[in-house]
Amino acid sequence: MFESLLNAFRAPDIRRRILFVLGILVVYRLLAQVPLPGVDREQLRAYFENNSAFGLLDLFAGGGLSSLSVVALTMNPYINASIIMQLMSGVVPRLQALSREGEYGRNKITQYTRYLTVPMALLQAFGILSAFSAQGIIVGGFSLDSLASWTQMITLIAGAIVLMWLGELITEKGIGNGISFIIFAGIVSQAPSAIGAFLANPNLRDILLFGVLAVVAVFVIIYIQEGQRRIPIQYASRVRGQKMYRGGQTFLPLRVNLAGVIPIIFAVSILQFPAQLSLYFTGSPITVVADVARAIGGALASTTIQYAILYFLLTVGFTYFYTAFTFKPDETAEQLRKNGGFIPGIRPGRPTQDYLARVVFRITVAGALFLGTVAVAPVVIGLLDPSLQGIALGGTGLLIIVSVVVETMKQIEAQLMMRNYEGFIR
């Protein structure tokens, strides 16, 4: 790993990409320190000390929500817009056609996702400010008739758009997925304070248990992330012009976890949305509506069994969903056919497509169950031992950090491999 980083910094183009990503992350962390105007900071701090409803969302925001900074919405509006566009791409004929038009189609869908991010950010900003106003956090209250309230909403929307832009810059000009990197930076920035809070009341048993769980989780995450199924590919001899090219044999690597860490991010974003809405309606003058909102908020708290079950199911579901979105068996089979390749024992064309679809479905079972189990295990441990409830946030954060680091190192090594570096992989 360290040798790969050293070799990466020796390559000027890769070094520029890495430094570019670091510069973007520094800009993001500086924006996270800019407070939103018109907020009672003491009331906000007291609210987050006594309420865990926004715990995971604040973790992803790098503390931007608990300090209500200008980027408090973090990447959540963009993530929700991406989920909606990907779902619509499977049912709307026009979007289906765009998704098959290569680079042009992907760029158009990305453009539509950006447009959809703005109303999603508006909805989330309205919900958060309304909920905080009901708790006495917003100075002067929140009202659509107030210029101050519109200023706060527009500021939060602008912060979400800037983060979306920074994330896309990382994806385009840096290394890795921009969404994952922004969330990764937020979680890492919270690590010192989280560790300090955990060690504030030292308990040897809890510290040892947390250490063992962390080591096991890191080992399992890396093991699964590195796991792959290698499909043998045979290329027939072919003649081009006056030259004859001999056939060869290679393999098609299919990762056990093709979706990476994105399903976790999607699942948390979906789970946090009803919790935000419930907080807004808890201040309703209608008793029934307020009671239902409080019941929903309590049921979706991050320390309940209902939350753990939904978290697991959503993670598994989004793993299959994102895998289907990123890996296209029909396109892979068509590329093999055009290049004269085939899987031994499998006829080219539709049989190859069906075979690849079956293999991906089976290996994704392991990846989906792995992601769901690792995400939910800290929550379950917290339910069994209330003194370890805070470990749930640390478990999710650890999963994302390790996954992003592993994926980034694999991309760096792939870049190095294209430059014929030798000896960087042991």
Image (tube, rainbow, N blue to C red):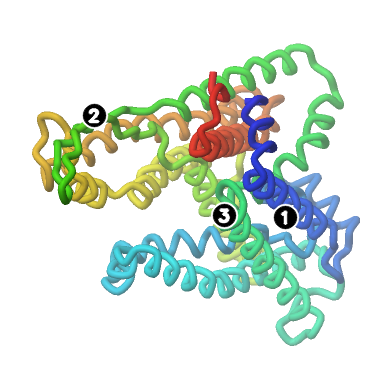
Report x, y in % for residue 49.
Answer: 81, 45
State the residue in front, 181 or 234.
Answer: 234
The image shows residue 270, relative to residue 5, as above or below, that is: below
Q: Amino acid at mark 2?
A: Gln
Q: Residues within 10 Å of mark 1 (few under 14, many from 20)?
A: many
Q: Residues within 10 Å of mark 2 (few under 14, many from 20)?
A: few
Q: Amino acid at mark 3?
A: Thr
On the rendered structure, is 311 left or right of 136?
A: left
State the residue in front, 375 or 400.
Answer: 400
Instruction: State if disc 1 and disc 2 touch (CB < 8 Å).
Output: no
* Visible residue check, residue 305: no
Q: Earlier in the sequence, mark 2 or mark 1?
A: 1
Which residue, as the protein is rendered here, is positioned at the far front?
242
Report x, y in % for residue 422.
Answer: 54, 25
Report x, y in % for residue 330.
Answer: 22, 50
**Residue 249: image tag:** 2
Q: Earlier in the sequence, mark 3 or mark 2?
A: 3
On the rendered structure, is 23 left or right of 12?
A: right
Q: CA distance from mark 1 to mark 3?
A: 11 Å
Q: CA distance from mark 2 to mark 1?
A: 42 Å
User: Which of label 3 and label 2 is nearer to you?
Assistant: 2
Residue receiving disc 1: 24
